[in-house]
């Protein structure tokens, strides 16, 4: 195997692998990347942690087919420190990889490509085109409320379902829930839903981050496949049952507050300055206003009144301000509504003029 490649192209192809490979694994090949030249002037760079498989397509020249696995960090550091321009790579005897550019020459220990984990086959799965902008937004609106407790395996990802016309993502950590819906074209159907792990969603978000238009998506248990012009991702889905999320979303409310998103966001951010992470804020609604108050014996007190549209009975509840702030940071509309019942009931927050995005926050005892 040998080929020549522009530094920037190889650097970009290797960059994606750095967040995927598992350098702490007892399996050496999980800290490696696989270089494979199958066609003239076409290189694939593969990386995996056995849950996510990534293949990057890189344009090369002067190629000879073959394959070799090398340390992901080792080759990435070498290429980063090479001068701009053309770099030559060639597999030598005993799986050494020679890397040259001008008078610069490296020899990097390599490994047999046969020991590298098999990449899941996606070519028999029909790809459906889906909007990259829409999918990025759906990820952003749910990723922050994924549960980080690894013992709650079924909550360690985002639930994704689609009936071919409407796609939905839902996440929860038991203290708050986020749900977003979007209309889709193309008929992608995954009616029973799947749970996409958090790391997998982060890698999907990275793969489609700077693109416009559409990308390909397919599902063949136990993987979700994502394909762009240069990247193919295979994400192993979480084999568990997501809880019946609709049971958590309040269907009725006795109080409703209408408020400017930015006013609430700014007030909660100011309150958070005075509070440690374990402290909540008091949220008191009464006719025409909301009082936000926080007390921390180690730092001090905070109070702020905000004018709102509210005519119901007075109610005081406690909330973790971070949960509300993270939801509000993803709301694009200027006005929101907060639907409330009693002091210890969950509250529902949504944009005033949209039914497509909502958050549920459980109250705190203060």
Image (cartoon, grey):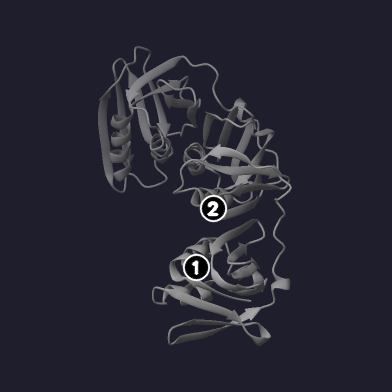
Q: Is residue 360 above or below residue 326?
A: above
- In the picture of the structure, the residue carrying the numbered disc 2 is 203
Choose between 78 and 282: the one closer to the eye.
78
In the image, farthest residue toward the top? 311
Choose between 253 and 113: the one closer to the eye.
113
In x, y percent, where is residue 89? 55, 78
Q: Quadrant of the C terminus?
A: top left
- Residue 155 visible in rendering: no
Q: Secondary structure at mark 2?
A: helix
Q: Which mark is residue 237?
A: none
**Is the residue marked by circle 1 packed among few (<14), some (14-19), or many (20+) residues within 10 Å?**
many
Query: Which-is-in-front pick, marks 2 and 1?
Result: 1
**Is the residue marked by circle 2 packed among few (<14), some (14-19), or many (20+) residues within 10 Å?**
some
In x, y percent, where is residue 348? 47, 25
In x, y percent, where is residue 242? 66, 37
Report the side of 296 relative to 78 (left or right): left
Q: Is residue 285 above or below residue 126?
A: above
Pointers 2 and 1 in contact (C-beta within 8 Å):
no
Q: CA distance from mark 2 to mark 1?
A: 19 Å
Residue 340 in which image quadrant: top left
Report the side of 75 relative to 50 (left or right): left
Q: Which mark is residue 10?
A: 1
Residue 316 in which image quadrant: top left
Report the side of 338 relative to 180 (left or right): left
- Residue 352 visible in rendering: yes
In x, y percent, where is residue 344? 49, 26
Q: Secondary structure at mark 1?
A: helix
Upstream in sequence: badge 2 or badge 1: 1
């Amino acid at each position: 195997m040998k080929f020549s490649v522009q530094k920037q192209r190889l650097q970009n192809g290797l960059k994606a692998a750095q967040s995927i490979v598992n350098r702490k694994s007892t399996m050496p090949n999980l800290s490696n990347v696989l270089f494979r030249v199958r066609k003239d002037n076409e290189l694939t760079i593969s990386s995996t942690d056995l849950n996510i498989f990534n293949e990057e397509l890189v344009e090369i020249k002067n190629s000879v087919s073959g394959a070799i696995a090398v340390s992901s960090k080792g080759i990435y550091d070498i290429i980063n420190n090479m001068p701009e321009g053309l770099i030559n790579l060639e597999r030598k005897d005993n799986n050494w990889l020679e890397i040259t550019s001008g008078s610069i020459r490296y020899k990097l220990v390599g490994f047999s490509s046969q020991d590298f984990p098999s990449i899941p086959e996606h070519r028999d799965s029909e790809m459906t085109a889906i909007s990259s902008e829409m999918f990025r937004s759906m990820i952003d609106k749910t990723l922050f409320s994924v549960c980080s407790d690894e013992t709650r395996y079924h909550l360690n990802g985002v639930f994704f379902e689609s009936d071919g016309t409407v796609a939905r993502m839902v996440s929860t950590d038991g203290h708050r829930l986020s749900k977003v819906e979007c209309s889709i074209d193309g008929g992608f159907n995954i009616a029973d839903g799947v749970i996409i792990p958090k790391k997998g969603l982060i890698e999907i978000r990275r793969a489609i981050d700077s693109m416009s238009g559409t990308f390909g998506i397919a599902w063949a248990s136990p993987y979700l496949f994502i394909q762009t012009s240069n990247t193919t991702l295979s994400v192993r889905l979480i084999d568990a049952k997501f809880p019946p999320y609709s049971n958590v979303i309040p269907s009725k409310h006795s109080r409703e507050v209408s408020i400017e998103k930015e006013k609430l966001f700014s007030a909660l951010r100011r309150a958070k300055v005075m509070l440690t992470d374990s402290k909540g804020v008091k949220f008191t609604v009464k006719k025409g206003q909301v009082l936000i108050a926080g007390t921390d014996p180690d730092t001090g007190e905070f109070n702020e009144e905000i004018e709102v549209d509210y005519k119901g009975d007075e109610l005081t509840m406690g909330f973790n301000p971070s949960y509300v702030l993270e939801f509000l940071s993803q709301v694009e509309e200027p006005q929101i509504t907060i639907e409330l019942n009693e002091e210890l009931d969950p509250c529902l927050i949504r944009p005033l003029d949209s039914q497509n995005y909502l958050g549920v926050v459980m109250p705190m005892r203060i």
